[in-house]
Image: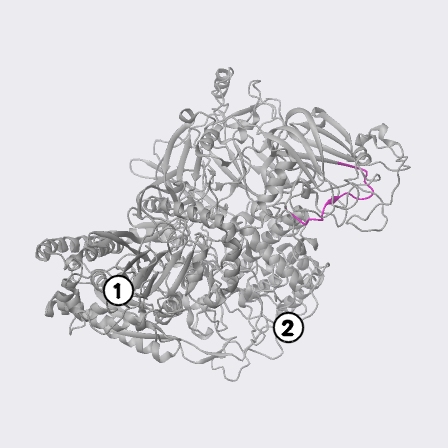
């Protein structure tokens, strides 16, 4: 009998429960303490422990079919079902919908049979069996999946359950993708090197417990400490599909356990866990000392866990000790020289920058105080957190490491004198390990170390406790209770370690490993003593100190014999008694022993076991850092009988390791550094500049379908679905010769925003058969199709070429006509390129509910040749509907944001927080003096990104009232000083940065823009704008929320040509080119600064803001008016606008310039981004390493000379007088680019909110204050099962949708809510038609071709009456033509009302398990179809109108003999006109399994082949390219043709592509995610595609013996 105690434990325990608050726990325990329960719980817990809490092992099967499709089949040990994850063969995105029978199965065999259609060996190309998934990423042309194929259970069973697995063998599965996005050679090389990273034996994980924190962790598994998670970025794709637990949380380092005992008997288990920090990853000479993330190189947290295994329901006593090791926490480095024996050590100019934050992180992690201490030695603990640094460096005169020792001491003094390290006692011990060994020998060196460590170790202490399996044992707990959902029992902690000891040498390798071993050895002996495990030999009593009585171990009791009075001891754990004290020793007594005394008094077998663990761990750390094993490890075996023999062997071994290290450091380190950074997901803009890490979904594949048949010239080719299937990649579909236009209507598998169209060029020998142009229309249904692309040219390309067509969304014809971009869209000559930013951007409509895509192909020559088509793919971005409906994952964040917003607005019914939103209202980078937003609805600022679940506008939107900020660059863009480190729900007190109470209308915003323009150019527009003024005017345009079309419309109204104020045309070409390079460099460095800022915040509080942001752009008319400012850089404003410039003048805050050291006001300060460009301000260059080294390819703006570790210098301030003009111009260019990106992201976020509102009705106030009675997913599944008699739900959104729009009454739930899951949306909301409508038709496209058995109509909460009970008629079909549909039946609900009163009136509140009121329409036989038409018709009393076009049944036009007063639509009592209404439509049946095999050979294949091989009328041939080269940062391509090439009359370029870097601007503080390109998964390139300008020139060079042709291609993007 299997059961779980989770339901009990949730009501019995809390994560942290102090002792004094246990009274309510005891009361809960009494309720369950029946004899049967106790016995059952005892049997369960014993069986659970013996089976290591695993009912089955996790199994992973990666299946690659013959078609190239890839499926990942996962069966977790923590679940009883199996999930199937689909890898899209085009983009590499992961797909999972959580539908039973589709990607959720009862077993692995069932899933494999479904994937292979029952023919595993016939359809499978390969199968890979694994034990765990370690990560996945789609990297352009390839998808890389990392799986663990072999595991070793190195710690089989932790106290409380949980197994730690070490990956002993892993495998990279390289999945070729059909993504035509180009990649440079450098990226391909990076991907190849990435797949060679060393994983085996150096990484471990636990799939049931959090092991990223000291044991026992109070946090659940899915909330790890990011400092020690190495595959956080690599596991992100699984989190995005809601399967975070399917990818193991991978730690780097060492984890292994040993069983030890005394006198030949097993008594205890010791485990050593070493967690390497990822804050400063890298190899030996590239990651030393502190970096800008306040992390040190080779930093490791070590934990020594000792416990006594118990059986038969007994508690498990344990204790643990934690220490750290790493390089010296100051800013230093070493330069390796081949000719020198040792590396040259150097210290940075500001070596102590970041040391304080490093110790603050340690203090916060190890600052837990003991609740109750049982040992007399530890009773008086200091309230300060002790941190002791043991420095093992050489300190002798002339030693190269002595400079580090000196700076280490000075850094300690500097931190102590600052007074900022609160509640912490920081100490340093210098102990020259090598000098001591050389002078005194190894034994005395160890003794000296013990003397130094004694008092700090006792002060730090250890953590002790018991794992309790039974609830009744809680009464005996005298300490802190730790519980979470990952384990069934509870931990009782009697004491916690407070503080930490840290060891270091130069590299945190050999000396550090030895010293930490001998320090932890003393702790290990004490740990065993406290657990009642004696490691004393027979000679131990000689060294015991008299007069000391030790405390008893857990579970022991002291009593006196009633007869003799002699003391004896009871062990309640084993139910035995003894006359001997179990722990007679004095605690920590071996610290006072000499080496020989320690050796003689201690059983050495457990010591040997511990030494083996440290030997293995030392080799692992050394290999990860240097590429070779540890040196000088013979000292760890000093307690063995033959140390001399080991020394002779180790001398030769050390020499070999030294040579290996030197070679690896000099040759291989740079490649390994790149591997580590890529694996961690940092500096990806450098290593993979063009890869999108949110790949689009291909939503045109089955179950997507064509709504109309596509005619083929060959009659046997009648399955047009092959055009949408990846399995028929080589298909050539031939339309008849008489076809003038080929029109395709594609119904997508999921609603989305369509971003791209991918066409596979398919033709025979004649390339003119493929269409020449194509029109694209998109819409939510057939009635709402809008033109997106018209007359797009399709070039003649080779057969099989993949061609992307970007789709930016429908653009209004008026905007197209107004903007210069629309006027010159098809112009052959563009006088000025938009190199700085797109001044004339056309904003297309974004709609995440797009479901129908209509393609119209036009042949090159009409009527003369047939039209051939290839595979068609529609790519887009969809919302996480599963999370939205279940309110989990990303959806939970959205609802938290929504509810908080409603609380702040007091649930105002007139406020709409989502629609018609001003993207910059509330997210404006302006300060208190910003002109108010355009929209009057100020509540619309509460936007949230539904694609990621993150809030659109973070907490920093709210302006602090005490600050007087007068610059344009405000808090929300201030990532350099106040970067958020987590995606958080915004605070409820969001306010606008406005000096006005009311909002602005669109006309008012346009007028404000004109006022700014006239202030700059004069009242009569007589003055021309320079570059800086034009850019500032553009900033004001973004503040006023004007699009480019609105701006141009405003300018044309006063007779001004927008081109005259285009900043792209106000600079000369040379200056423009240089400015673009600097702005691009600034964008890269800004990305580095944000990455480091986010990483540095791990384990720390957010940093304070000093008031200067990254750009610090002043407003129009702002000037320096502070008397204390010594710079006075801005004293003559070009204009003055009272509504913008504050009345109080400039800012009164003052700073000190880091260059000239003069006092400077905020207006005269440059943005902190200028600090990242010192080479353009002065000739001073810092000595930091250049991390942005060449990766094989540079792409235009990705220059190789940009250092990427300058974020540490952002803490200073530089004035504008010390900055060159080009740096100031670069800041303003970058700032405008950020505003452009933020506007795009805000538009995407608002479109997502609008889509959700159109599905579940977010505007309903009831939705926020009520809770759906079936909100629990399991309960809803049970209700659905009863409603459908166990069959599948085939018409559930988002997999199903409406084919046509449906008229909806004002205030009603949206029509799509009829298909939403039954547990989503407000409980009392329902759809209703306008009262004037008596007939409504719903064309429902099912999720797949299905066998339908019936339809269920959920009755509205208001119920039916005789006046509004509808007549229901149902038709079915596979195509959209009504003439082809078949009628299934007709039902009159009024007859049901007459026979039963169940449907009358409002729904009665009852048990939560009640099935909602419903009407079933059961078919006589199952009908296979894809589209279902459902019509609802009510009779109008006294109606004389007949609507024959709506197919009214003439027999239904009789007057209704029953007339009743109709309730209001939402349950009111007022009389109103009856209307059609319903709650939900459910369709019952089963989906039809699609054949996964390739199409069979058809009889017309011979005719098809002969037709395709017909020669074209115009002869064409391919001219091979002999050689080509790229130069000028890949801006120029030279191609050399063969001298033997014939004279050319023309040429075409096949598959010419350009690499588009992702990084185009510095990030704002909104972009807090390291791997998020924008606030939504919808990247800028998908909202507004880049424009590529190509200039082609052909040259013929006459040489002495040959004629060479050169084709030069210049492109700018």
> Residue at horizontal 57%, vertical 61%?
953
Mark 1, other Cα within 10 Å: few <14 / some 14–19 / many ≥20? some
Q: Is residue 1335 magenta?
A: yes
Could you give the CA–CA distance between mark 1 and mark 2, rounded to whole angstroms? 88 Å
Q: Secondary structure at mark 1?
A: loop
The magenta segment: 1320-1336
Q: Is residue 968 magenta?
A: no
Q: Of the numbered discs in the image, which one, if any, rests on residue 1137?
A: 2
840 vs 1336, nearest the viewer: 1336
706 vs 267, nearest the viewer: 267
**Callout 1–callout 2 Cβ contact below 8 Å:** no
Q: Which residue is outermost to the bottom?
A: 1123
1177 vs 219, nearest the viewer: 219
Compared with 707, 666 (above or below) is below
Main secondary-structure element of the magenta-colored stretch: loop
Residue 1394, image x and y in percent? 82, 35
Q: Secondary structure at mark 2?
A: loop
Residue 710: tell me if it is visible.
yes
Say which quarter of the image contains residue 905: bottom right
Q: Of the numbered discs in the image, which one, if any, rests on residue 581?
A: 1
């Amino acid at each position: 009998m299997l059961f779980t105690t989770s339901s009990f434990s949730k009501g019995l325990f809390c994560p942290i429960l102090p002792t004094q608050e246990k009274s309510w726990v005891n009361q809960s325990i009494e309720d369950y303490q029946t004899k049967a329960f106790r016995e059952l719980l005892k049997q369960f817990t014993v069986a659970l422990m013996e089976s290591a809490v695993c009912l089955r092992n996790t199994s992973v099967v990666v299946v690659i079919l013959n078609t190239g499709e890839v499926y990942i089949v996962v069966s977790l040990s923590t679940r009883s079902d199996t999930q199937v994850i689909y890898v899209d063969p085009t983009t590499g995105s992961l797909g999972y919908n959580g539908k039973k029978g589709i990607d959720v199965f009862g077993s692995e065999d069932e899933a494999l049979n479904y994937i292979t259609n029952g023919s595993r060996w016939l359809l499978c190309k390969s199968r890979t069996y694994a034990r765990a998934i370690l990560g996945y990423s789609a990297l352009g042309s390839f998808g890389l999946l990392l799986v663990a194929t072999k595991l070793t259970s190195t710690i089989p069973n932790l106290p409380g359950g949980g197994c730690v697995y070490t990956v002993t063998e892993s495998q990279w599965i390289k999945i070729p993708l059909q993504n035509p996005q180009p990649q440079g050679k450098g990226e391909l090389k990076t991907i190849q090197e990435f797949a060679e990273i060393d994983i085996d034996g150096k990484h471990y994980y636990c799939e049931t417990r959090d092991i990223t924190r000291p044991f026992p962790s109070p946090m659940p598994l899915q909330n790890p400490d990011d400092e020690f998670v190495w595959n956080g970025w690599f596991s992100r794709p699984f989190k995005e599909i809601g399967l975070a637990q399917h990818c193991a949380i991978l730690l780097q380092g060492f984890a292994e356990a040993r069983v030890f005992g005394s006198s030949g008997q097993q008594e205890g288990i010791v485990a050593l866990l070493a967690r390497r920090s990822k804050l400063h990853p890298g190899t030996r000479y590239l990651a030393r000392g502190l970096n800008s993330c306040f992390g040190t190189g080779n930093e490791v947290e070590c934990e020594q866990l000792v416990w006594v295994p118990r059986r038969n329901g007994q508690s498990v006593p344990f204790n643990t000790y934690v220490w750290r090791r790493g390089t010296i926490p100051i800013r230093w480095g070493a330069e390796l020289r081949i000719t020198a024996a040792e590396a040259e050590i150097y210290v940075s100019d500001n070596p102590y920058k970041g040391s304080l934050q490093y110790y603050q992180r340690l203090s916060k992690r190890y600052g837990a105080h003991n609740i109750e201490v049982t040992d007399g030695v530890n009773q008086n603990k200091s309230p300060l957190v002790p941190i002791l640094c043991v420095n093992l460096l050489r300190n002798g005169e002339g030693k190269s490491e002595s400079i580090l020792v000196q700076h280490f001491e000075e850094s300690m003094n500097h931190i102590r004198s600052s007074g900022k390290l609160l509640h912490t006692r920081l100490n340093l011990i210098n102990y020259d390990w090598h000098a001591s060994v050389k002078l005194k020998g190894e034994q005395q060196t160890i003794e000296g170390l013990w003397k130094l460590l004694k008092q700090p170790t006792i002060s730090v202490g250890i953590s002790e406790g018991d794992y309790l399996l039974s609830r009744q044992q809680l009464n005996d707990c005298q300490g802190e209770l730790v519980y979470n959902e990952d384990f069934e029992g509870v931990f009782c902690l009697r004491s916690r370690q407070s503080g930490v000891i840290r060891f270091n040498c130069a590299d945190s390798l050999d000396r550090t490993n030895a010293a930490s071993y001998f320090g932890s050895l003393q702790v290990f002996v004490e740990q065993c003593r406290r657990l009642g495990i004696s490691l004393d030999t027979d000679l131990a009593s000689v060294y015991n100190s008299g007069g000391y009585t030790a405390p008893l171990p857990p579970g022991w009791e002291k009593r006196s014999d009633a007869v003799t009075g002699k003391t004896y001891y009871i062990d309640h754990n084993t139910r035995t008694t003894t006359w001997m004290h179990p722990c007679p020793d004095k605690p920590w007594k071996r610290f006072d022993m000499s080496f020989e005394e320690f050796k003689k008094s201690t059983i050495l077998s457990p010591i040997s076991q511990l030494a083996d663990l440290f030997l293995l761990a030392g080799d692992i750390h050394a290999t990860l850092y240097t590429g070779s094993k540890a040196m000088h490890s013979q000292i760890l075996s000093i307690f063995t009988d033959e140390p001399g023999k080991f020394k002779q062997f180790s001398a030769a071994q050390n020499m070999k390791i030294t040579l290996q290290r030197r070679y690896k450091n000099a040759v291989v380190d740079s490649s390994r550094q790149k591997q580590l950074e890529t694996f961690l997901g940092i500096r990806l803009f450098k290593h993979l500049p063009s890869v999108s890490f949110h790949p689009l979904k291909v939503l045109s594949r089955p179950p997507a379908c064509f709504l109309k048949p596509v005619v083929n010239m060959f009659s046997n080719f009648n399955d047009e679905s092959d055009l949408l299937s990846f399995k028929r990649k080589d298909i050539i579909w031939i339309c008849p010769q008489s076809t003038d236009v080929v029109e395709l209507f594609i119904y997508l598998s999921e609603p989305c925003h369509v971003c791209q169209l991918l066409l596979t060029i398919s033709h025979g020998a004649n390339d003119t058969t493929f269409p020449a142009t194509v029109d694209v229309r998109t819409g939510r249904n057939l009635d709402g199709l809008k033109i997106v692309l018209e007359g797009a040219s399709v070039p003649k390309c080779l057969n099989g070429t993949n061609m992307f067509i970007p789709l930016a969304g429908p653009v209004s014809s008026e905007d197209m006509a107004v903007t210069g971009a629309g006027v010159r869209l098809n112009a052959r000559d563009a006088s000025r390129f938009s190199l700085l930013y797109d001044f004339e951007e056309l904003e297309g409509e974004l709609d995440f509910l797009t479901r129908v895509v209509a393609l119209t192909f036009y042949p090159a020559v009409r009527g003369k040749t047939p039209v051939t088509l290839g595979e068609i793919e529609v790519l887009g971005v969809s919302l996480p509907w599963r999370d939205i409906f279940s309110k989990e994952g990303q959806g939970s964040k959205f609802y938290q944001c929504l509810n908080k917003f409603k609380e702040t607005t007091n649930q105002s019914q007139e406020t709409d927080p989502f629609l018609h939103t001003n993207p910059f209202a509330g997210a404006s980078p302006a300060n208190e003096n910003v002109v108010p937003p355009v929209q009057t609805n100020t509540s619309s600022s509460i936007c949230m990104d539904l694609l990621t679940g993150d809030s659109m506008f973070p907490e920093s939107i709210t302006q602090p009232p005490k600050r007087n900020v007068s610059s344009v660059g405000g808090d929300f863009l201030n990532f350099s000083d106040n970067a958020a480190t987590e995606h958080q729900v915004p605070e409820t007190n969001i306010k606008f940065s406005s000096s006005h109470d009311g909002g602005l209308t669109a006309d008012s915003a346009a007028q404000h823009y004109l006022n700014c323009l006239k202030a700059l150019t004069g009242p009569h527009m007589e003055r021309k704008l320079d570059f800086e003024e034009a850019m500032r005017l553009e900033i004001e345009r973004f503040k006023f929320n004007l699009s480019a079309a609105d701006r141009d419309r405003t300018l044309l109204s006063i007779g001004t040509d927008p081109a005259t104020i285009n900043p792209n045309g106000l600079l000369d070409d040379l200056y423009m080119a240089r400015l673009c390079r600097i702005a691009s460099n600034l964008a890269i460095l800004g990305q580095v600064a944000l990455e480091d800022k986010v990483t540095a915040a791990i384990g720390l509080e957010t940093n304070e803001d000093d008031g200067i942001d990254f750009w610090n752009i002043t407003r129009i008319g702002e000037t320096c008016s502070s008397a204390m400012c010594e710079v006075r850089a801005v004293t003559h404003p070009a204009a003055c606008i009272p509504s913008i410039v504050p009345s109080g003048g400039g800012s009164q805050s003052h700073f000190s310039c880091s260059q000239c050291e003069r006092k400077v006001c905020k207006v005269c300060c440059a943005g902190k981004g200028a600090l990242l460009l010192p080479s353009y301000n002065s000739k001073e260059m810092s000595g930091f390493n250049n991390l942005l080294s060449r990766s094989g390819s540079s792409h235009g703006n990705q220059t190789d000379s940009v250092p990427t570790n300058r974020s540490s210098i952002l803490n200073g301030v530089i004035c504008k007088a010390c900055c060159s003009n080009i740096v100031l111009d670069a800041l303003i260019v970058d700032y405008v680019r950020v505003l452009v990106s933020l506007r795009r992201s805000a538009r995407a976020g608002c479109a997502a909110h609008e889509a959700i509102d159109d599905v579940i009705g977010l505007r309903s106030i009831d939705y926020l204050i009520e809770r759906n009675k079936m909100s629990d997913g399991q309960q809803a599944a049970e209700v659905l099962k009863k409603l459908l008699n166990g069959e599948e739900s085939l018409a559930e959104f988002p997999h199903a949708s409406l084919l046509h729009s449906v008229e909806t009454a004002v205030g009603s739930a949206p029509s799509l809510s009829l298909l939403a899951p039954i547990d989503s949306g407000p409980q009392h909301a329902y759809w209703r038609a306008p009262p004037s409508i008596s007939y409504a038709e719903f064309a429902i496209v099912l999720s797949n071709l299905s066998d339908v058995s019936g339809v269920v109509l959920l009755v509205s909460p208001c119920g039916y009456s005789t006046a509004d009970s509808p007549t229901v008629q149902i038709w079915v079909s596979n195509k959209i033509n009504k003439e082809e549909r078949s009628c299934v039946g007709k039902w009159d609900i009024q007859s049901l009302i007459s026979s039963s009163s169940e449907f009358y009136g409002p729904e009665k509140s009852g048990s939560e398990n009640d099935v909602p009121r419903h009407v079933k329409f059961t078919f006589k036989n199952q009908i296979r179809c894809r589209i279902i038409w459902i019509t609802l018709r009510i009779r109008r009393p006294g109606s004389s109108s007949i609507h024959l076009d709506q197919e009214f049944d003439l027999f239904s036009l009789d007057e209704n003999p029953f007339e009743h007063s109709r309730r209001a639509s939402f349950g009111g009592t007022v009389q109103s006109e009856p209307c059609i209404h319903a709650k939900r439509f459910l369709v019952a049946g089963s989906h039809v399994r699609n054949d996964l095999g390739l199409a069979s050979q058809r009889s017309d294949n011979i005719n098809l082949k002969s037709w395709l091989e017909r020669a074209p009328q115009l002869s064409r041939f391919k001219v091979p390219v002999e050689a080509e080269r790229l130069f000028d940062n890949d801006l120029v391509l030279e191609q050399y043709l063969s001298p033997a090439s014939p004279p050319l009359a023309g040429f075409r370029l096949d598959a010419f592509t350009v690499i588009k870097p992702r990084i185009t601007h510095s990030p704002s503080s909104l972009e807090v995610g390291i791997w998020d390109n924008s606030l939504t998964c919808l990247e800028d390139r998908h909202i507004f595609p880049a424009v590529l300008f190509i200039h082609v020139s052909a040259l013929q060079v006459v040489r002495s013996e040959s004629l060479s042709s050169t084709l030069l291609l210049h492109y700018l993007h």
